[in-house]
Image (cartoon, rainbow, N blue to C red):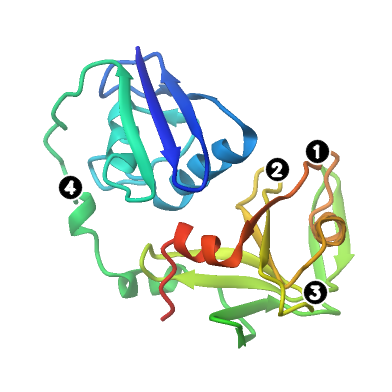
Amino acid sequence: MYRFKIQHYLGGPLIITLDAEWEQKATATIEGPDFDSFLVMDYMQHHGYTPFGKTAAFPQLAPMDIHCTYSTAPEFEFEILEGDLLPYPPSPGLSKDSLPPAEYYDHLFPAYKQKIPFKSFEVYITQQPGDTLTGFTDNGKPWHREVTYPLGYIRDTSQSVFLDVIIGNHSESEQVFVATPPGEFTVYMLGFDDQPKAAAVFQHHYPTADQKRLNSVTEASFTMMLDFEPD
């Protein structure tokens, strides 16, 4: 059994519990407020690694994966409440510190129609207003929606990933609304100054019966939280 106490600098502490040995994967459970859990899970989604340099993600993790991901992250305070800290096993491949540079993964970034500046970010637009967006409902039925706001991504070259975004009309807004469609990656909504409006736009583009309240962070916190480095 392992229990970890983790706290992001923007939030409060929470507890991650794993009923597993150091190298054994099991289902991780999180005890804590929703927003604090979001900060921890979102970091793992974008920055989670095993000691072997492979991607790690909730909920199937080994205790050493959690230690590898959060113990060296400057955004977090990390403490082992239960369980023994053991050495990492010999790596059969790349370590976290010897991963290829971001350019190595250029082919993984999706194709885009245009690149636009939005405040301090460069946004790669994949769907423009008037385009048709398709997907499936929670029960597997296909749906079609007209795109009403630019959809795309921001490249985070420091981590060789892309972050899905929806761009609103209020460039002066300092808020970033955050939502996660079921089975999809987190979507960051920039340029919206009203939570109900952002939620309605999100629901239009990602229709689901499991609609949860959007979280909100400041633009400055969003930039720092994701270690964003413009290319």
SS for callout 2:
loop
The number of callouts visible is 4
SS for callout 3:
loop
Q: Residues within 10 Å of mark 2 (few under 14, many from 20)?
A: some
- Which numbered dot is residue 182? 2
Where is residue 137, by image quadrant? top right
Q: Measuring 61% from the left and 31% from the top, which residue is drawn there?
A: 33
Where is residue 204, by image quadrant? bottom right
Distance, label 1 to label 4, CA atoms, is: 40 Å
Q: Is residue 141 above or below residue 225?
A: above
Distance, label 2 to label 4, CA atoms, is: 33 Å
Q: Are discs 1 and 4 less than 8 Å apart at CB?
A: no
SS for callout 4:
loop
SS for callout 1:
loop
Judging depth in this view, the residue of 200 and 218 nearest the camera is 218
Q: Position of residue 201 (x, y in %)?
A: 84, 62
Q: Are discs 1 and 2 less than 8 Å apart at CB?
A: yes
Which amino acid does the dot numbered 2 rest on?
Pro
Distance, label 1 to label 3, CA atoms, is: 22 Å
Q: Residues within 10 Å of mark 1 (few under 14, many from 20)?
A: few
Q: Measuring 59% from the left and 79% from the top, which residue is drawn there?
A: 123
Q: Earlier in the sequence, mark 1 or mark 2?
A: 2
Q: Which residue is mark 1?
A: 210
- Which numbered dot is residue 93? 4
Distance, label 3 to label 4, CA atoms, is: 42 Å
Q: Is residue 161 above or below residue 38?
A: below
Q: Are discs 3 and 4 less than 8 Å apart at CB?
A: no
Q: Position of residue 67 (x, y in %)?
A: 29, 34
Q: Which residue is mark 3?
A: 149
Q: Are discs 2 and 4 less than 8 Å apart at CB?
A: no
Which amino acid does the dot numbered 4 rest on?
Gly
